[in-house]
Image: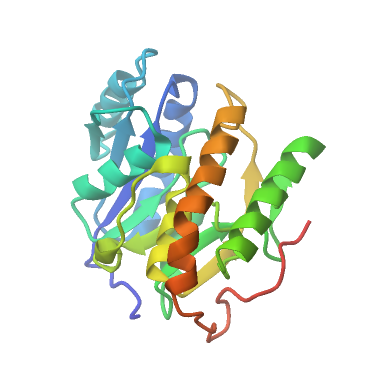
Amino acid sequence: MASPDFSEGLSIVIPTYNERENIEQLLAEIGLVAPQLKRPSEVVLVDDRSPDGTAELASQLGRDRGLDIRVVTPNGPRSLGGAIARGLDACRWDLVCVMDADLSHPPSLIPTLIASLDGADGVVASRYVPGADIESWPFRRHLISLGATLIARIGLRVRCRDPLSGFFVFRRSFLRSVRIRGDGNKPLLEILVQAQPMVAEIPYLFRNRKNGESKLTGRSIGEFLSLVLRLWPTSRDAPVIQPQGRGLSDADPPQS
């Protein structure tokens, strides 16, 4: 795949629910990064009807700071994965970056993710490649994350070291064959299993959320396991693709 040229725009898809405490800092950081992108950009904020006024505040901040922000409110059951799928449909540009609003994903990494698209189908900001680190996670959270990652990689034959990452770049045109249902709240895993992309992985410092509630609950774990079971037949049918080229995902196990 060719590297994106500077005349091509970028859509940044951000799902939100009760992120009012984080949205101002996040948009400020995106505003600082925007000039480095050297391309048109927009923020597609998909808000799942937050009662704390996240959407309203984001719209106001966009007007005040001159950011191109569009707020999308999906219908139907509340779902992180479903919100991302709705955001992808609403994007103006083909080049898309997906990230969380809880300040765990640094916008400063976006230029590197885009630059790394050269030679890959997609780029994943990874917590489990050399050079990456996770800040302020308790042991239980590390254990759950590593266990889920191993289940996804071994059970679904996924080569990406961090298939559960919520921070990644793809082209919407590449994703046309993928049906992202959003169940299990792991859209990247749906993409990896259905499309079998060759992805590059970029290490970064994952910052644990400082405000708001964690998305990790007993229910979310159950939904993830249900997603793995749903994707299992597809993973058996898909050919195993060998990685090619420096920087692309390989079969090494996740690093602790």
Q: How is the image coloured?
A: rainbow
Residue 149: which quarter of the image? bottom right
Q: Residue at x 51, y 80 (%)?
A: 240
- Camera-nearest residue between 205 and 167: 167
Task: Tell me if residue 87 comes above or below residue 115 in the rendering.
Answer: above
Residue 211 percent across, percent down from the top left: 58, 23
> What residue sits 35% from the left and 43% below the top?
84
> Which residue is more in the foreground, 225 or 29?
225
Q: Foreground residue, 193 or 113? A: 193
Q: Would residue 61 be seen by someone viewing this image from the given angle? A: yes
Q: How many marks?
A: 0
Horizontal and vertical percent for residue 237?
Answer: 43, 73
Judged left or right of residue 45, residue 20 is: right
Q: Vertical placement of 55 versus 80: above or below?
A: above
Residue at 35% x, 80% y is 1
Residue 89 image offset from top left, x and y in percent: 21, 48
Q: Looking at the image, which residue is at 62% across and 76% down? A: 250
Task: Please state which of residues 204 and 149 is positioned toward the viewer in this rendering.
Answer: 149
In this view, 34 is above or below 82: below
Residue 165 at x, y = what percent?
A: 54, 52
Q: Is residue 217 visible?
A: no
For the C terminus, the image quarter is bottom right
